[in-house]
Amino acid sequence: MFNKKIALAGVMIAAFASTAYAPQSHAATTSSSVKFQMNQYSYMNNTGNHSLTVAPYALHGNVMVPLRALAESLGAGISWNQASQTATIAGQAFGQIKLKVNAKIAVNQKGEQIKLPESIKQVKGSLVVPAKSIAGLMGAKVNWSSSTRTITITQNTEVRDSITVSYNFSEGNDGWKGDFADLPVDYNKDIYELQYARELLPLGDANKTNYGLKLKGVNRSDDLFMFLTRKVDDLKPNTAYQVKLDFGMYTSESGGMMGVGGSPSEAVKVKAGVINKEPAAIQKDDGGSLYYRMNIDKGIQSESGADAKVLGDITKPDSGKEGYQRVNFSYSAAVTTNAKGDLFLLIGTDSGYEGLTTLYFDDIKLTATQK
């Protein structure tokens, strides 16, 4: 059984890495292409004809083309670091590639260095790269026509217009992360007792195989947000989806009880959201003191926010029975994926009860359908 206390470091902490989840999806293939002609100050892609400040040219038998026109035509993003003179292109099919001016190597997603036939050039403010090599690193196909002296680069990308994925944590944490917010950066670890772990569900001694994700913490700061999050990728970029997030929670808290700051059950609200930005606890100044606060709008305690809605509280169904009991929750919303085709799942509890809360989560299921 995995049981580990964690010290909050302002970053997400994962207990285990695993691929023990079962995605079911309907995929569609999209095709992007770009055509360059030697010594011509224009190019053609899926959206039409566009002008260039630098015309493609040959160098030692290699066709050199402007990087931005190549990358963006194939749906990749591009960023520039002036200090290091490095361009980074990022796309769904290949992750990211770093290219430095005057260097004859490319660095891929894994940090591997790939030798290039020509160095990266900077001409009239534009980066120029060996087309065939960079296209290959992007997973694209290259076709050269000697009769027209044109190079055509095509990339086929499989994207999902619907997906159903379930997580039961039988073999690991299935890519989920856990973290905590709304507490001082210099919090006392001994009195907060923060814990995120994959453990056997508290279903009695007979349970030897049914695991869930555990969140535990003592609210010492009038408010404590404990949360789980996971990225879901390979959806269509900048596309609206109707999503439904279902999950089970195991709680031992009875209703109608009194506690410091509020009830141990009714004052601890369950929240969930599906958004296109990764939820994270970040350091923020609060009245001259540093606190971990969320980078998204989850609302405050019993209130919903723009990115997370209150679904209920942690009261168990039968307060007359001892031990943990399961409560099922469901969240639905319309959400648009980000430029990479990503969505992020968020499940958490916002506490007004100034005491110890220990919860387990299991059987998380997401259904996303393109609108």
Image (cartoon, helix red, strand yellow):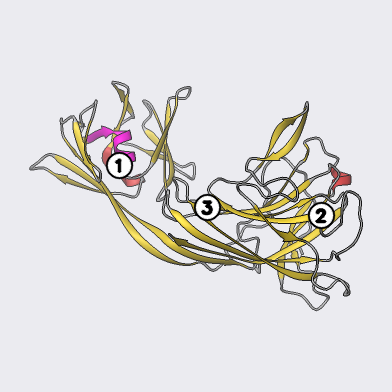
Q: Nearer the viewer, mark 2 or mark 3?
A: 2
Secondary structure of the magenta portion, mostly?
helix
Quadrant of res 99: top left
Element class at badge 1: helix
Residue 284 picture location, percent across and down: 70, 32
**Left or right placement of residue 38 versus residue 283 in this view:** left
Element class at badge 3: strand
Residue 310 picture location, percent across and down: 69, 55
Tell me whether the residue at label 3 lies in contact with that at label 1, contact meaning CB atoms closer than 8 angstroms.
no
Q: Which mark is residue 267?
A: 2
Extreme residue in the left direction:
147
- Identify residue type, mark 1: Ser
Residue 63 picture location, percent across and down: 22, 36
Which residue has dot 1 on it? 73
> What residue appears at the point 83 percent right and 73 percent down from the top-left corner?
318
Camera-side residue of 53 and 259: 259
Chain part drawn in magenta: 63-73
Residue 289 picture location, percent across and down: 79, 29
Q: Which mark is residue 343?
A: 3
Q: Marks 3/1: CA distance?
A: 23 Å
Element class at badge 2: loop
> What residue appears at the point 80 percent right and 79 percent down from the top-left corner?
206
**Left or right placement of residue 367 versus residue 104 in this view:** right
Quarter the N terminus occupies: bottom right
Q: Nearer the viewer, mark 3 or mark 1?
A: 3
Vertical side of 334 occupied by 144: above or below: above
